[in-house]
Image: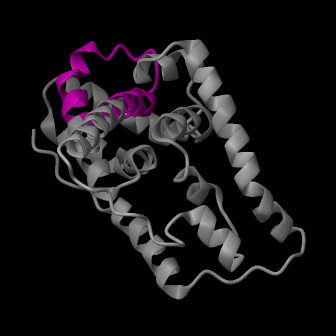
Amino acid sequence: MNDPGPHRQAALSALVCRAREGDKAAFEDLVRLTYADAFSLALRLTGDEQDARDVLQEAYLRAYSGLARFRGDATFTTWLYRITANRAATFMTKRERHHHESLDAGLQVPERSPGSDPAERASTSCELVDVARVLDTLPPSWRAVVVLRDVYDLPYDVVAEELGVTVTAAKIRVHRARKRLREQLGPAARLQRGDRAAPVPPAEAGAQSGAAGRAEEVSPVAL
C-alpha cells in the first residue's frame, strides 16, 4: 500500500502532536482519517468484519495509550498498521485456541457445502479469481505475512516482530503464500488471456460493495 501523500502526512503529524498533548478531538480526527485503511488491513488479517472491528477497536485504544512512546521513526499510519497486525495476531491465536477447545468439548464442525470455498467457486463457475478472494483461502499465518509484506510493504523484521516469529519463518511463510497465490491465480490468468469468464453474480457483487461501504463507516472508539 502506498504511503499517504505529503499533505495528508503533514496533517496526520500535526494531529499526532496535538493528540500527544491530550487533545482527544485530534485523536478522533486521526481515527477518522486512518480508519478505512486500518479496517482493510484488519479485515484481510482476520477474514471477518466483526472480528476486524474488534481488533481495530483494541488497536486504536493501544495507539491512544501509547502515543507518548511514539517517537516518529515511522509514519503514524505505519505505526498503526504494526499495532493492528500485532492485535490481529493475538486475536487469531486466541480464536484458534478457542476453536480447538470447542472441538475437544465435543462440538461438531459443520461441513462446508460445495462451492463455499472461493477457489472452488472459481473453478466450477469459471469466475475470474481476484487476489483478495484468493487471499481468503490462505491459512491465517500465511495471509498475515503476505498482506503485511506485499500489500503494506512492511520490512521482514517488522513483520516478524509484530507476528511473533523469526525473520526466517516470516520469509518462509511469504514464499509459501506467494507460491499458493500463483497456483490459485493461474486459472484467472488464463481467463484474462481470452477464455470466457462468467460474470460475478449481482448478489455477490452487492455483498462486496457493501463490505467496502461499511469499511468507510468509522466505528466510535471509546477513549
User: Looking at the image, which residue is at 67% across and 75% down?
Assistant: 124
Outermost residue, left side? 223
Residue 205 pos. (x, y %):
52, 78
Tell me the quarter of the picture where residue 154 sits.
Answer: top right
Quarter of the image where the N terminus is located = top right
User: Looking at the image, which residue is at 51% across and 12% down?
Assistant: 166
User: Looking at the image, which residue is at 21% across and 38% down?
Assistant: 101
Left or right, 146 with reference to 71 = right
Residue 214 pos. (x, y %):
34, 66
Left or right, 137 with reference to 59 = right
Residue 48 pos. (x, y %):
35, 55
Left or right, 194 with reference to 10 = right
Residue 220 or residue 110, whichever sits in front: 110
User: Is residue 174 within the magenta segment?
Assistant: no
Outermost residue, front side? 106
Residue 207 pos. (x, y %):
43, 75
User: Looking at the image, which residue is at 26% across and 45% down?
Assistant: 103
Look at the picture and state if 210 lies above or below 54. below
Q: Which residues are magenta?
A: 59-87
Query: Is the stretch drawn in magenta largely helix, strand or loop?
Result: helix
Residue 197 or residue 207, whichever sits in front: 197
User: Is residue 62 within the magenta segment?
Assistant: yes
Quarter of the image where the C terminus is located = top left
Outermost residue, bottom side? 202
Disc tally is 0
